[in-house]
Image: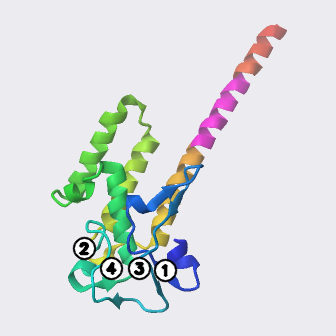
Amino acid sequence: NYLHNGCKDSIYHLDLKPENILLDKNMFPKIGDFGLSRLFRSEQTHITSKIMGTVGYMPPEYIDRRAITSKFDVFSLGVIILQIVTGYDGYYKCEHMPPQEFIEHVHENWGKRMQETMSSHTSEQVITCIKIALRCVEFDREKRPTIAGIIDELNKIDNAESSATDKKKMSTLWKNYLRFKNKKKRVQK
């Protein structure tokens, strides 16, 4: 998001893939390998003469016409999210089934793997991530979300989790208070 929207001029990475996402000691992701990155001022689309990057993470408009836009990195991010949620071949699997069937299939697999430990909130997180990823890998780049839109959706998931956790903590505190109050009444009698 910072590269696309926080800089004076947009920077497109053009080679987002798991190998270029590093984790620091606190497990915060850092993007590395800016060897193919390009700085774009006000241009919406840029055409290049040769193909650069990693096959599998490049959007169709780049493969077909060598067109570079802000949606290039969005496509790559979608492939990465699919790989995280579904496994390495996730992107290729999603091409062979309707979106809703794919979402249900992946969600069911998560449920099987986590068995009884998957909360309803985690279940919603998985579904939301799959939906975001599928929109990111849309063939038509105009239908893909922006990086800022993706960040907003992911923040909503985090905020919902925080809210649910806070409600659960408050509920537990309230129950403990009532138990204490009832014990105190019994002791006083």
Residue displayed at 37% across by 34% down:
114
Q: Position of 59 compared to 147: left or right? A: left
Using the image, determine if residue 69 lies above or below residue 77: below
Task: Report the span colored magenta.
Answer: 165-178
Q: CA distance from mark 3 to mark 1?
A: 9 Å
Identified by mark 3, the residue type is Ser
Image check: 138 left or right of 117? left
Given this view, does label 3 or label 1 mark the residue nearer the observer? 1
- Which residue is label 1 attached to? 11
Question: In the image, 165: left or right of 110?
Answer: right
Q: Which residue is labeled 2 in the image?
A: 139
Given residues 168 and 60, the one toward you in this image is 60
Circle 3: element type: loop
Mark nearer the N terminus (3 vs 1): 1
Q: Are marks 3 and 1 in contact (CB under 8 Å)?
A: no
Q: Position of residue 132 (x, y in %)?
A: 37, 61
Mark 4 belongs to which amino acid? Glu
| Residue 96 place in picture, x, y as percent | 15, 58
Q: Which mark is residue 142?
A: 4
Q: Residue at x 54, y 47 (%)?
A: 161
